[in-house]
Image (tube, rainbow, N blue to C red):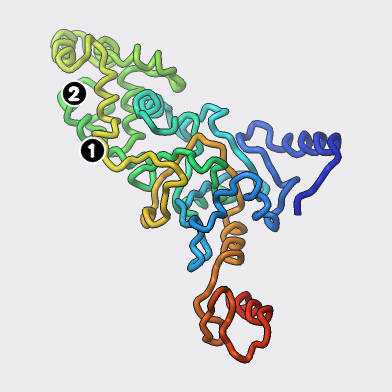
Amino acid sequence: MLKIFKYNDFINEERKHFSKYKGSRSESLDHLFTTNDIEELLQKYAPYFLEDKNIDSTFGSSNLMPVYRGVNRKGDIAIINPSAHDRVSRNTENYYTLIIDDTWEGFPKRSKSLICSSSPSRGNEDYERTYRIIPTNPDAVFGIAPKKDIWISFKNGISELNNIFSDFFQYTTNFGGLGNDLNVFNTFLKDSFELEPNESLESLKSKLTVYNFVNTNVAMHEEEEAIERLEEISDNGSLYSIFERVLSIKENPGFKAIKYSESNKKDFTTEKEIWTESECLMIDAEAFDKWMRNKFYTPSVDKHGWSIENGMSTDPRLKSDEERRKRVEDSK
Protein backbone atom coordinates (compact mmCIF):
# COMPACT_ATOMS: atom_id res chain seq x y z
CA MET A 1 0.00 0.00 0.00
CA LEU A 2 1.27 3.49 -0.84
CA LYS A 3 2.76 5.21 2.19
CA ILE A 4 1.64 8.80 2.80
CA PHE A 5 3.88 11.33 4.55
CA LYS A 6 3.34 14.88 5.69
CA TYR A 7 5.11 17.18 3.27
CA ASN A 8 8.12 17.87 5.51
CA ASP A 9 8.39 14.22 6.50
CA PHE A 10 8.21 13.25 2.83
CA ILE A 11 11.01 15.64 1.83
CA ASN A 12 13.21 14.44 4.70
CA GLU A 13 12.55 10.83 3.76
CA GLU A 14 13.41 11.55 0.12
CA ARG A 15 16.74 13.12 1.09
CA LYS A 16 17.60 10.36 3.54
CA HIS A 17 16.72 7.58 1.14
CA PHE A 18 18.26 9.00 -2.02
CA SER A 19 21.48 9.83 -0.19
CA LYS A 20 22.15 6.10 0.03
CA TYR A 21 22.48 6.02 -3.74
CA LYS A 22 24.58 9.13 -4.27
CA GLY A 23 26.25 8.88 -7.67
CA SER A 24 23.72 6.35 -8.94
CA ARG A 25 21.60 7.07 -12.00
CA SER A 26 18.56 5.50 -10.32
CA GLU A 27 16.39 6.86 -7.54
CA SER A 28 14.89 4.37 -5.12
CA LEU A 29 11.12 4.22 -4.68
CA ASP A 30 11.29 1.65 -1.87
CA HIS A 31 10.13 4.24 0.66
CA LEU A 32 6.91 4.69 -1.35
CA PHE A 33 6.20 1.24 -2.78
CA THR A 34 6.94 -2.40 -1.92
CA THR A 35 6.70 -5.46 -4.14
CA ASN A 36 3.16 -5.86 -2.80
CA ASP A 37 2.29 -2.53 -4.47
CA ILE A 38 3.33 -3.34 -8.05
CA GLU A 39 -0.14 -2.71 -9.43
CA GLU A 40 -0.30 0.74 -7.78
CA LEU A 41 3.22 1.45 -9.02
CA LEU A 42 2.30 0.63 -12.62
CA GLN A 43 -0.98 2.54 -12.41
CA LYS A 44 0.97 5.62 -11.36
CA TYR A 45 3.96 5.45 -13.71
CA ALA A 46 3.06 3.10 -16.60
CA PRO A 47 -0.71 2.44 -16.77
CA TYR A 48 -0.50 1.37 -20.43
CA PHE A 49 1.38 -1.76 -19.32
CA LEU A 50 -1.81 -3.12 -17.68
CA GLU A 51 -4.00 -2.75 -20.77
CA ASP A 52 -5.64 -6.01 -21.85
CA LYS A 53 -3.86 -6.03 -25.22
CA ASN A 54 -0.50 -6.05 -23.42
CA ILE A 55 -1.30 -9.03 -21.16
CA ASP A 56 -0.91 -12.71 -22.04
CA SER A 57 -3.16 -14.53 -19.56
CA THR A 58 -2.10 -17.92 -20.95
CA PHE A 59 1.27 -17.50 -19.25
CA GLY A 60 0.62 -14.63 -16.86
CA SER A 61 3.14 -12.41 -18.63
CA SER A 62 3.36 -9.30 -20.79
CA ASN A 63 2.96 -9.38 -24.56
CA LEU A 64 5.54 -6.59 -24.82
CA MET A 65 9.27 -6.95 -25.25
CA PRO A 66 10.96 -8.44 -22.15
CA VAL A 67 13.63 -6.06 -20.83
CA TYR A 68 16.00 -6.88 -17.96
CA ARG A 69 19.02 -5.25 -16.37
CA GLY A 70 21.53 -6.50 -13.83
CA VAL A 71 22.60 -3.91 -11.25
CA ASN A 72 24.83 -3.85 -8.20
CA ARG A 73 22.42 -2.07 -5.88
CA LYS A 74 20.04 -2.71 -3.01
CA GLY A 75 16.29 -2.25 -3.01
CA ASP A 76 13.39 -3.67 -5.00
CA ILE A 77 11.97 -0.67 -6.86
CA ALA A 78 13.54 2.38 -8.49
CA ILE A 79 13.07 4.86 -11.31
CA ILE A 80 15.84 5.87 -13.66
CA ASN A 81 16.27 8.61 -16.25
CA PRO A 82 19.39 7.50 -18.17
CA SER A 83 19.42 10.47 -20.56
CA ALA A 84 20.27 12.75 -17.64
CA HIS A 85 23.73 11.19 -17.46
CA ASP A 86 26.56 10.47 -19.88
CA ARG A 87 27.34 6.78 -19.95
CA VAL A 88 30.87 5.46 -20.47
CA SER A 89 31.22 1.95 -21.87
CA ARG A 90 32.05 -0.57 -19.18
CA ASN A 91 35.66 -1.86 -19.19
CA THR A 92 36.70 -0.20 -22.44
CA GLU A 93 37.22 3.04 -24.31
CA ASN A 94 34.18 4.78 -25.73
CA TYR A 95 35.20 5.37 -29.36
CA TYR A 96 32.60 3.18 -31.03
CA THR A 97 29.86 4.83 -28.93
CA LEU A 98 30.88 8.27 -30.19
CA ILE A 99 30.69 7.12 -33.81
CA ILE A 100 27.34 5.34 -33.39
CA ASP A 101 25.76 8.29 -31.58
CA ASP A 102 27.03 10.60 -34.31
CA THR A 103 25.65 8.62 -37.24
CA TRP A 104 22.73 6.36 -36.27
CA GLU A 105 19.53 8.32 -36.90
CA GLY A 106 16.38 7.21 -35.06
CA PHE A 107 18.25 5.22 -32.41
CA PRO A 108 18.62 6.08 -28.72
CA LYS A 109 22.05 7.54 -27.96
CA ARG A 110 24.26 4.83 -26.47
CA SER A 111 26.01 7.43 -24.33
CA LYS A 112 22.67 8.39 -22.76
CA SER A 113 21.10 4.95 -22.53
CA LEU A 114 20.33 2.19 -20.10
CA ILE A 115 21.90 -1.00 -21.50
CA CYS A 116 19.67 -4.04 -21.02
CA SER A 117 18.99 -7.58 -22.21
CA SER A 118 15.94 -9.51 -23.33
CA SER A 119 17.03 -12.34 -21.02
CA PRO A 120 16.86 -12.36 -17.20
CA SER A 121 19.78 -14.79 -17.05
CA ARG A 122 21.97 -12.29 -18.88
CA GLY A 123 21.06 -9.69 -16.30
CA ASN A 124 22.26 -12.00 -13.52
CA GLU A 125 25.85 -12.14 -14.73
CA ASP A 126 28.27 -10.31 -12.42
CA TYR A 127 25.48 -8.39 -10.65
CA GLU A 128 23.72 -8.52 -7.29
CA ARG A 129 20.19 -8.06 -8.60
CA THR A 130 18.20 -8.44 -11.80
CA TYR A 131 15.43 -5.94 -12.51
CA ARG A 132 12.53 -5.89 -14.92
CA ILE A 133 12.70 -2.63 -16.89
CA ILE A 134 9.46 -0.88 -17.89
CA PRO A 135 9.52 2.53 -19.61
CA THR A 136 7.10 5.11 -18.24
CA ASN A 137 6.36 6.25 -21.81
CA PRO A 138 4.78 3.56 -24.05
CA ASP A 139 6.41 5.19 -27.07
CA ALA A 140 9.92 5.01 -25.60
CA VAL A 141 12.34 4.05 -28.37
CA PHE A 142 14.60 1.03 -27.88
CA GLY A 143 17.63 0.06 -29.91
CA ILE A 144 17.93 -3.69 -30.45
CA ALA A 145 21.12 -5.49 -31.40
CA PRO A 146 20.96 -8.67 -33.50
CA LYS A 147 23.05 -10.58 -30.91
CA LYS A 148 23.09 -10.97 -27.14
CA ASP A 149 25.94 -8.45 -26.92
CA ILE A 150 26.68 -5.46 -29.11
CA TRP A 151 30.39 -6.43 -29.02
CA ILE A 152 29.72 -9.37 -31.34
CA SER A 153 27.13 -7.67 -33.56
CA PHE A 154 29.50 -5.99 -36.06
CA LYS A 155 31.07 -8.98 -37.76
CA ASN A 156 30.32 -7.71 -41.28
CA GLY A 157 31.65 -4.20 -40.67
CA ILE A 158 34.81 -5.28 -38.89
CA SER A 159 35.47 -7.86 -41.59
CA GLU A 160 35.25 -5.02 -44.12
CA LEU A 161 37.63 -2.93 -41.99
CA ASN A 162 40.08 -5.84 -41.99
CA ASN A 163 39.97 -5.83 -45.78
CA ILE A 164 40.46 -2.05 -46.01
CA PHE A 165 43.40 -1.97 -43.60
CA SER A 166 44.99 -5.34 -44.38
CA ASP A 167 47.74 -3.70 -46.43
CA PHE A 168 48.52 -1.27 -43.61
CA PHE A 169 48.78 -3.70 -40.70
CA GLN A 170 52.42 -4.16 -41.73
CA TYR A 171 53.03 -0.68 -40.35
CA THR A 172 51.52 -1.36 -36.90
CA THR A 173 53.34 -3.23 -34.16
CA ASN A 174 50.31 -4.78 -32.43
CA PHE A 175 47.89 -5.83 -35.15
CA GLY A 176 47.77 -8.55 -37.72
CA GLY A 177 43.99 -8.22 -37.96
CA LEU A 178 40.96 -6.94 -36.08
CA GLY A 179 39.20 -10.15 -35.13
CA ASN A 180 35.41 -9.94 -34.94
CA ASP A 181 34.46 -7.74 -32.00
CA LEU A 182 34.39 -4.11 -30.97
CA ASN A 183 36.90 -4.52 -28.17
CA VAL A 184 39.74 -5.10 -30.64
CA PHE A 185 38.35 -2.32 -32.84
CA ASN A 186 38.60 0.14 -29.92
CA THR A 187 42.14 -0.98 -29.13
CA PHE A 188 43.13 -0.61 -32.77
CA LEU A 189 41.90 2.98 -32.83
CA LYS A 190 43.56 3.82 -29.53
CA ASP A 191 46.98 2.43 -30.42
CA SER A 192 47.06 3.37 -34.11
CA PHE A 193 46.01 6.99 -33.62
CA GLU A 194 47.29 7.63 -30.07
CA LEU A 195 43.83 8.36 -28.69
CA GLU A 196 43.07 9.28 -25.09
CA PRO A 197 40.61 7.13 -23.08
CA ASN A 198 37.94 9.87 -22.96
CA GLU A 199 38.01 11.53 -26.35
CA SER A 200 35.20 13.89 -27.40
CA LEU A 201 33.62 13.39 -30.82
CA GLU A 202 35.35 16.50 -32.13
CA SER A 203 38.81 15.39 -31.00
CA LEU A 204 38.19 11.87 -32.29
CA LYS A 205 37.40 13.21 -35.74
CA SER A 206 40.45 15.47 -35.66
CA LYS A 207 42.77 12.59 -34.74
CA LEU A 208 41.53 9.90 -37.14
CA THR A 209 43.73 11.16 -39.96
CA VAL A 210 46.32 9.84 -42.38
CA TYR A 211 48.95 12.03 -40.71
CA ASN A 212 48.32 10.60 -37.23
CA PHE A 213 48.27 7.01 -38.45
CA VAL A 214 51.55 7.43 -40.28
CA ASN A 215 53.17 9.46 -37.51
CA THR A 216 52.24 6.83 -34.92
CA ASN A 217 52.91 3.62 -36.83
CA VAL A 218 55.16 4.08 -39.84
CA ALA A 219 58.94 4.07 -39.92
CA MET A 220 60.45 7.19 -41.47
CA HIS A 221 61.74 5.45 -44.57
CA GLU A 222 58.22 4.13 -45.36
CA GLU A 223 56.28 7.32 -44.69
CA GLU A 224 56.00 8.56 -48.25
CA GLU A 225 54.62 5.26 -49.59
CA ALA A 226 52.19 4.85 -46.66
CA ILE A 227 50.85 8.39 -47.00
CA GLU A 228 50.32 7.98 -50.72
CA ARG A 229 48.35 4.74 -50.28
CA LEU A 230 46.30 6.02 -47.34
CA GLU A 231 45.41 9.26 -49.14
CA GLU A 232 43.69 7.15 -51.79
CA ILE A 233 41.14 5.84 -49.27
CA SER A 234 40.85 8.99 -47.13
CA ASP A 235 38.50 11.96 -47.29
CA ASN A 236 40.90 14.87 -47.68
CA GLY A 237 43.24 13.25 -45.20
CA SER A 238 40.50 12.16 -42.76
CA LEU A 239 39.84 8.46 -42.12
CA TYR A 240 36.74 9.04 -39.96
CA SER A 241 34.29 8.24 -42.79
CA ILE A 242 35.80 4.75 -43.07
CA PHE A 243 35.10 3.93 -39.43
CA GLU A 244 31.67 5.54 -39.71
CA ARG A 245 30.84 3.27 -42.64
CA VAL A 246 32.05 0.01 -41.12
CA LEU A 247 29.95 0.70 -37.98
CA SER A 248 26.88 1.69 -40.00
CA ILE A 249 23.52 -0.09 -39.85
CA LYS A 250 23.77 -0.67 -43.60
CA GLU A 251 27.03 -2.56 -43.19
CA ASN A 252 25.73 -4.49 -40.15
CA PRO A 253 22.15 -5.69 -40.76
CA GLY A 254 19.93 -6.81 -37.90
CA PHE A 255 19.92 -3.67 -35.76
CA LYS A 256 16.47 -2.19 -35.15
CA ALA A 257 14.89 0.79 -33.40
CA ILE A 258 11.29 0.31 -32.23
CA LYS A 259 8.75 1.92 -29.93
CA TYR A 260 8.11 -0.15 -26.81
CA SER A 261 4.33 -0.09 -27.40
CA GLU A 262 4.90 -1.68 -30.83
CA SER A 263 7.17 -4.45 -29.57
CA ASN A 264 6.19 -8.11 -29.21
CA LYS A 265 7.75 -10.72 -26.94
CA LYS A 266 7.49 -13.27 -29.78
CA ASP A 267 10.34 -11.46 -31.55
CA PHE A 268 12.73 -12.29 -28.70
CA THR A 269 13.07 -16.06 -28.81
CA THR A 270 16.84 -15.49 -28.84
CA GLU A 271 18.70 -13.21 -26.45
CA LYS A 272 19.42 -9.67 -27.65
CA GLU A 273 21.05 -6.55 -26.21
CA ILE A 274 18.58 -3.67 -25.83
CA TRP A 275 19.05 -0.02 -24.92
CA THR A 276 16.95 3.08 -24.30
CA GLU A 277 17.47 6.64 -23.12
CA SER A 278 13.87 6.94 -21.82
CA GLU A 279 12.81 7.08 -18.19
CA CYS A 280 12.11 3.58 -16.83
CA LEU A 281 10.89 1.76 -13.76
CA MET A 282 13.19 -0.87 -12.29
CA ILE A 283 11.38 -3.66 -10.41
CA ASP A 284 12.99 -6.72 -8.83
CA ALA A 285 12.57 -9.30 -11.61
CA GLU A 286 11.73 -12.29 -9.45
CA ALA A 287 9.07 -10.37 -7.51
CA PHE A 288 7.67 -8.85 -10.70
CA ASP A 289 7.36 -12.16 -12.56
CA LYS A 290 5.66 -13.74 -9.53
CA TRP A 291 3.21 -10.84 -9.30
CA MET A 292 2.38 -11.02 -13.01
CA ARG A 293 1.62 -14.73 -12.79
CA ASN A 294 -0.53 -14.37 -9.67
CA LYS A 295 -2.38 -11.41 -11.16
CA PHE A 296 -2.96 -12.46 -14.75
CA TYR A 297 -2.39 -16.19 -15.26
CA THR A 298 -5.63 -18.00 -16.04
CA PRO A 299 -5.31 -21.79 -16.32
CA SER A 300 -7.54 -23.53 -18.86
CA VAL A 301 -8.62 -26.21 -16.36
CA ASP A 302 -8.79 -26.21 -12.56
CA LYS A 303 -6.71 -28.47 -10.32
CA HIS A 304 -9.34 -31.21 -10.59
CA GLY A 305 -9.52 -31.08 -14.39
CA TRP A 306 -12.74 -29.09 -14.78
CA SER A 307 -12.65 -26.45 -17.52
CA ILE A 308 -12.56 -22.77 -16.64
CA GLU A 309 -14.90 -20.21 -18.19
CA ASN A 310 -14.99 -16.49 -17.46
CA GLY A 311 -12.45 -16.94 -14.69
CA MET A 312 -14.53 -19.56 -12.86
CA SER A 313 -14.40 -23.35 -12.55
CA THR A 314 -17.26 -25.26 -14.20
CA ASP A 315 -17.21 -27.96 -11.51
CA PRO A 316 -20.99 -28.46 -10.83
CA ARG A 317 -20.30 -29.41 -7.22
CA LEU A 318 -19.32 -25.82 -6.45
CA LYS A 319 -22.38 -23.85 -5.34
CA SER A 320 -21.31 -20.20 -5.63
CA ASP A 321 -19.31 -17.95 -7.94
CA GLU A 322 -16.97 -17.22 -5.04
CA GLU A 323 -16.16 -20.93 -4.70
CA ARG A 324 -15.69 -21.25 -8.44
CA ARG A 325 -13.27 -18.27 -8.54
CA LYS A 326 -11.36 -19.57 -5.53
CA ARG A 327 -10.88 -22.93 -7.28
CA VAL A 328 -9.25 -21.05 -10.17
CA GLU A 329 -6.97 -19.14 -7.78
CA ASP A 330 -6.02 -22.38 -6.03
CA SER A 331 -5.20 -23.93 -9.41
CA LYS A 332 -2.59 -21.36 -10.40
How many numbered dots are placed on residues in this image? 2
**Contact? badges 2 and 1 (CB < 8 Å):** no
* Residue 315, percent from left and from top: 58, 87
Drawn side of residue 27 relative to residue 164, left or right: right
Kindly report the distance in space between the C-alpha atoms of the residues bearing marks 2 and 1. 22 Å
Q: Residue 42's spot in the image, x, y percent? A: 62, 50
Residue 195 lies left or right of residue 81; in this view the side is left
Which quadrant is home to the C terminus? Answer: bottom right
Tell me what residue is drawn at x 63 percent, y 91 percent.
317
Mark 2 or mark 1, which is nearer to you? 1
Residue behind mark 1: 156
**Quadrant in which the N terminus is drawn:** bottom right
Kind of element beneath mark 1: helix
Residue located at (15% from left, 24% from top): 167
Looking at this view, is 266 or 201 the one in front? 266
Decide: is 199 above or below 145.
above
- Nearest the camera: 93 or 143? 143
Check disc 2 and report the residue beneath it: 170
The residue located at (58%, 81%) in the rendering is 313
Estimate the x, y position of residue 37 in percent, counting from the top left.
69, 55
Give neighbour class at mark 2: few <14, some 14-19, many 20+ (Cα, 10 Å). Answer: few
Amino acid at pointer 1: Asn
> Type of residue at label 2?
Gln
Q: Is residue 272 left or right of residue 192?
A: right
